[in-house]
Amino acid sequence: MTQEANEGPVVMVTGGSSGLGKVIARTFLDAGFRVVIVGRNQERLDAAKREWGKLEQVKTAVADVSTHAGAANAVAVTNEHFGRLDALVNCVGSSDRGLVENLTHQRLDELIQQNVHTALLCSVAALPLLEVSSGAIVNIGSLAGKVGARYLGGYCVAKHALSGLTQQMRLELKPRGVHVALVSPGPIRRDDAGSRYTAQVDETLPADAAKPGGGTSVKGIAPEKVAAAVLDAVRRRRPDVVMPGYLRLLIAIGHLSPRIGDWLLRKLTSSKERKP
Ligand SMILES: NC(=O)c1ccc[n+]([C@@H]2O[C@H](COP(=O)([O-])OP(=O)(O)OC[C@H]3O[C@@H](n4cnc5c(N)ncnc54)[C@H](OP(=O)(O)O)[C@@H]3O)[C@@H](O)[C@H]2O)c1
């Protein structure tokens, strides 16, 4: 190992082989962090690592972090390679489409496992290392964790649970020197953004529910911008970031006046009502 590869803070990014997690990992790498990316597929992890070139500063951990053993293994791999952990980014998560009346408890369990268990299990496993470094945890939420938009199946429930978990963790872990942040982006730009959920949009939903955010008029955000906000949340110990920032006003209005909040949400989300 070179001396350079032995220095610098360490971040573990779950879901770091694809999508937003991959961009976050790259952003931390460029900022001087040594990086561990976690996913369930070794080839995808290796492909990401090869793309970045800095082979000594990037390690991979194959683990299903929705299980206790997987989360513990990912943290153990990080410790074996680098002997420390300064930041944990819990990015594993997945969205959904559908009406609440068609949401099964099995599907809701899956979404909670993907979006909540993963963050909880990794955070608990990483806590001893993060206490030593007075480090930070960033959970990747969503606007769907701040408001309950239509047609998003069980995603709003799962991301709201993650929002609550994050605030509780922040309050409980502050005295132990560990910062916990939530970054809640709106739709993120990606090549397959318009087609990812087509299969889940049936005749019960308007066609534009397949679009990012379930058909919201909020413009897609560059993943690099979200990744920069995650890095900033670690460095400046920001507690709660909403992207785009102006939507914090909508969220606040919804708390002060739920009637106006609902009206604004209808305006900003899917333009069509479900078919009768
Ligand atoms: N995309 C958006 O517009 C958007 C908007 C707001 C918030 N978000 C949030 O941003 C995060 C990333 O979303 P994305 O769409 O960029 O994700 P994505 O492209 O679907 O990537 C998911 C990543 O997580 C890994 N993964 C999935 N389940 C895992 C598990 N159980 N254990 C370990 N790794 C696992 C995947 O790799 P393997 O499959 O190989 O394991 C992959 O690297 C999510 O939390 C999402 O809710 C996304």
Image (cartoon, rainbow, N blue to C red):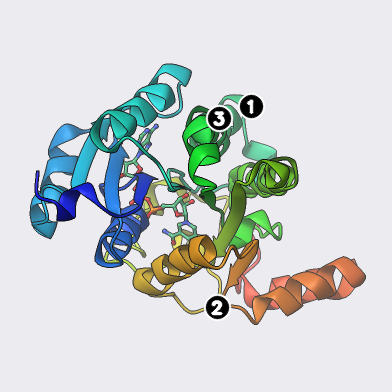
Q: How far across and down, in percent of the image, does residue 228 sit?
A: 41, 71
Circle on res. 253 = none
Q: Is residue 53 above or below residue 162?
A: below
What's the CA distance linking mark 1 and mark 3? 26 Å
Of the numbered discs 1 and 3, the one sitting upstream in the chain is 1
Alpha-carbon span between mark 2 and mark 3? 37 Å
Q: Residue at x 83, y 75 (%)?
A: 253
Disc 3 secondary structure class: helix
Mark 1 nearby-residue class (10 Å; few <14, some 14–19, many ≥20): few
Label 2, secondary structure: give it.
loop
Left or right, residue 149 beside residue 227: right
Q: Residue 116 appears in which quarter of the rendering?
A: top right
* First-in-chain label (1 vs 2): 1
Q: What amino acid is at disc 1?
A: His
The residue labelled by disc 1 is: 105
Callout 2: CB less than 8 Å from ligand 1: no
Residue 214 visible within the image: no
Seen in the picture, residue 45 relative to 140 is either above or below; the reply is: above
Residue that mark 2 sits on = 217
Q: Give whichever of 35, 62 is nearer the camera.
A: 35
Please provide percent x and percent y for residue 245: 61, 78
What residue is drawn where x is 56% and y is 54%? 141
Q: Amino acid at mark 3?
A: Val
Estimate the spatial distance between the alpha carbons at disc 1 and disc 2, rounded to whole Å: 30 Å
What amino acid type is highlighted by mark number 2? Ser
Report whether 211 appears left or right of 254: left
Circle 3 residue: 124
Which residue lies at the image location 66% right of the left edge and 65% below the top edge? 273
